[in-house]
Image (spheres, rainbow, N blue to C red):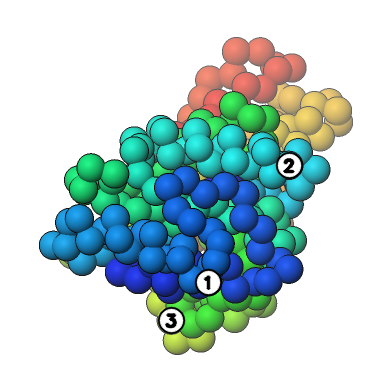
Amino acid sequence: MTAKIVKGSSFSGAVGYMLSKEEKAEILKAEGVRIEPKELTAKSFEMQASMNPNIKRPVWHISLNFSEKDKDKLSNEKMVKIAEAYLQKMNIKNTQYLIVRHHDREHPHIHLCINRIDNDGKLISDKNEKYRSAKICRELTEKHGLYIAQGKENVNRERLIGYDKTKYEIYDALKGAIPKSKTWSDLEKQLRKDGITFQFKTASKTDKIQGIFFEKNGIKINGSKVDRECSYSKIDREIKDNALKTLREAEQQTQQAGLAENAVQTLTSLIAQLSIFTTPSSSHYDATLAEYIQALKARKWAAKNKIRIHRIR
């Protein structure tokens, strides 16, 4: 469950959109407003908002969106129950609201039109609304046993344009390429297939990497702006994990072959032959496997027939 919050000045615009879907719009509940005839619905909101005319944006238009996987769990009654719990937790009380379900998308969703001017003419606070909303959505999703989408899974890619479209194309490409990459060079090759390049951001007058930018279609986006999981540090960590997995698989091979005594040398030779890490002078130097190899070489082995590989942080 996710929420999209928009504040506006026109009740007629919000109500008009919510009820314009004809057979695809279904009124689930109205609190403090008339729904027949439809022309009076917006008027009901406007009359109450006039109690505090200094507020220029008295309209809250909030959509609550659910995963397509929850379609069979979400009756109209269930959605109203969730919507009212959401309003209570957001401290949106003692005011008018309209709840309408739309059936124009694959995923279940409802729209709420809410008066920010309560029944006593006071303004309902919107402080930290998006932060509070995200937390509440998570709580309600878990409470009602609904599907928890990972990251940007539920975003409709087909409706995106411009910057957002490119951002999600980069995100999708990274989620497919990172698990296959043991080095940054591997990742670079994978991304080029999708027309994506990247550039490291280094500290002033040093070679220390502080961040990463991705570029596609002339649009350059900071890795952390693509997604929190796409920052330089997060990607580097996952690449190192992939490299460690490769070393462990090689370790098993050496043990099976009865070469435990010379495991470090064997691993080094195998990795060098496969060219799965580059040299320090490379423009995209992969310290990843080099660090692992160096650590393995420096470590004292406790037993001849057992190799212990520790996580390199």
> Cα distance, mark 2 to mark 1?
22 Å
In contact (CB < 8 Å): disc 2 and disc 1 = no
Q: Nearer the viewer, residue 100 or 133?
A: 100
Q: Amino acid at mark 1?
A: Tyr
Q: Can residue 228 be seen here? A: no
Residue 54 horizontal/vertical position (percent):
13, 62
Give the mark, 2 or 1, whose residue is nearer the N terminus: 1
Residue 27: image quadrant is: bottom right
Give the mark, 3 or 2, whose residue is nearer the N terminus: 2
Give the mark, 3 or 1, whose residue is nearer the N terminus: 1
Dot in front, 3 or 1: 1
Q: Residue at x 71, y 48 (%)?
A: 270
Callout 2: few (<14), some (14-19), or many (20+) C-alpha neighbours within 10 Å?
Answer: few
Residue 159 horizontal/vertical position (percent):
60, 75
**Element under label 1?**
helix
Residue identified by numbered label 3: 219
> Cα distance, mark 3 to mark 1?
33 Å
Q: Residue at x 53, y 81 (%)?
A: 161
In the drawing, does residue 49 fall left or right of residue 89? left
In the drawing, does residue 142 fall left or right of residue 198? right
Callout 1: few (<14), some (14-19), or many (20+) C-alpha neighbours within 10 Å?
Answer: few
For residue 75, the mark is 2
In contact (CB < 8 Å): disc 3 and disc 1 = no
Residue 147 horizontal/vertical position (percent):
68, 40
